[in-house]
Image (tube, helix red, strand yellow):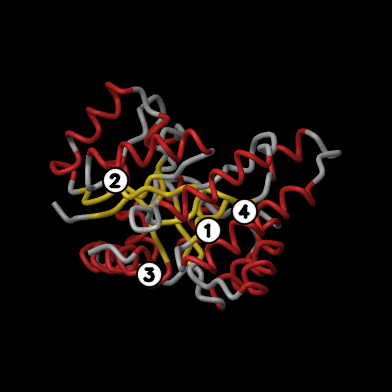
């Protein structure tokens, strides 16, 4: 079976039995690696532990923005962890801006979240690590401003859902974009997949986030990405073998995977 890489998964959020079942089936499913995101300091430490147990797990360290801001002690410890584990960490992520949280609470002080994101972007610039971004709609404009200001070009926008104008800016800057299994059934995500060249496109599950359509009621797992790749091949009217090959090359190149 062709090999693929899940470019964005929250492996530490699965139950232990589910995670073990998933890892045991990766080879059979043709999945060569998992880029495993973290959501806070404890999550980053746990994800690093999982990576030490299984070399197919490529850990990222960051603070997910769709939650209350961390205290300064946690931020400092997380940034220090990135420095201490620089050779073990694959990326800084998941970081970004709180789109959904601000929808729930319009009084939220977005400036504090931008300031925190800027600290992670500066860390990406200092370490040379790629950065994985939660900037799903117009927040991507602000994120692009910050990336450009600090000269960070290895940026991965996961599950982006914003406008064509913002997407064009991201692509012109050379940033990578990943699509979830929604590419099989959601028109907006299908349109984004059409527009993003294979040289900047990756596939992800964002597991354990659940999906609808043909995946309704199923545990999210990397094997679902074969359906994503088939959908991308159909959308781009390309041989599926070519799509497998080029998406794998893009992901390996972006994350410097051997």
Dot 4 or dot 3, earlier in sequence: 4
Where residue 206 appears, as percent x and y from the top left, is: 44, 42
Q: Residue at x 39, y 24 (%)?
A: 217
What residue did someone put label 1 on?
157
Question: Residue lying furthest bottom in this view?
Answer: 172
Residue drawn at x 52%, y 38% is 41
Which callout, 3 or 1, points to the residue nearer the camera?
1
Name which of mark 3 and mark 1 comes first in the sequence.
1
Residue that carries the numbered disc 3 in the rendered image: 198
Marks 2 & 3, CB-CB < 8 Å contact = no
Q: Are marks 4 and 1 in contact (CB under 8 Å)?
A: yes
**Distance of mark 2 from mark 1, alpha carbons?**
20 Å
Residue 70 occupies which quadrant of the picture? Answer: top right
* Residue highlighted by disc 4: 135
Q: Nearer the viewer, mark 4 or mark 3?
A: 4
Task: Give the left or right position of residue 66, taking residue 48 as reference.
Answer: right
Cβ atoms under marks 3 and 1 closer than 8 Å: no
Label 3 element class: helix
| Dot placed on the residue nearer the N-terminal end, 2 or 1 | 2
């Amino acid at each position: 079976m062709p090999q693929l890489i899940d470019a964005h998964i929250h492996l530490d959020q699965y139950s232990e039995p589910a995670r073990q079942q998933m890892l045991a089936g990766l080879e059979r499913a043709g999945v060569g690696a998992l880029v495993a995101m973290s959501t806070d300091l404890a999550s980053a430490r746990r994800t690093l532990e999982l990576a030490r147990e299984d070399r197919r797990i490529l850990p990222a360290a960051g603070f997910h923005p769709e939650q209350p801001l961390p205290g300064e002690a946690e931020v400092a410890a997380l940034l220090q962890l990135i420095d201490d584990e620089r050779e073990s960490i694959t990326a800084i992520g998941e970081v970004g801006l709180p789109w959904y949280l601000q929808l729930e609470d319009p009084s939220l002080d977005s400036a504090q979240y931008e300031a925190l994101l800027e600290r992670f972007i500066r860390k990406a610039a200092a370490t040379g690590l790629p950065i994985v971004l939660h900037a799903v709609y117009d927040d991507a404009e602000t994120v692009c401003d910050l990336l450009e200001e600090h000269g960070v070009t290895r940026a991965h926008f996961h599950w982006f859902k914003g406008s064509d104008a913002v997407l064009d800016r991201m692509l012109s800057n050379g940033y990578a974009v990943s699509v979830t299994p929604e590419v099989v059934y959601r028109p907006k995500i299908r349109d984004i997949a059409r527009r993003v060249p294979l040289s900047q496109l990756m596939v992800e599950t964002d597991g354990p986030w659940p999906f609808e359509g043909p995946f309704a009621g199923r545990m999210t797992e990397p094997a679902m990405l074969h359906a994503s790749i088939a959908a991308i091949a159909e959308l781009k009217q390309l041989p599926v073998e070519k799509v497998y090959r080029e998406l794998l090359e893009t992901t390996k190149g972006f994350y410097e995977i051997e």
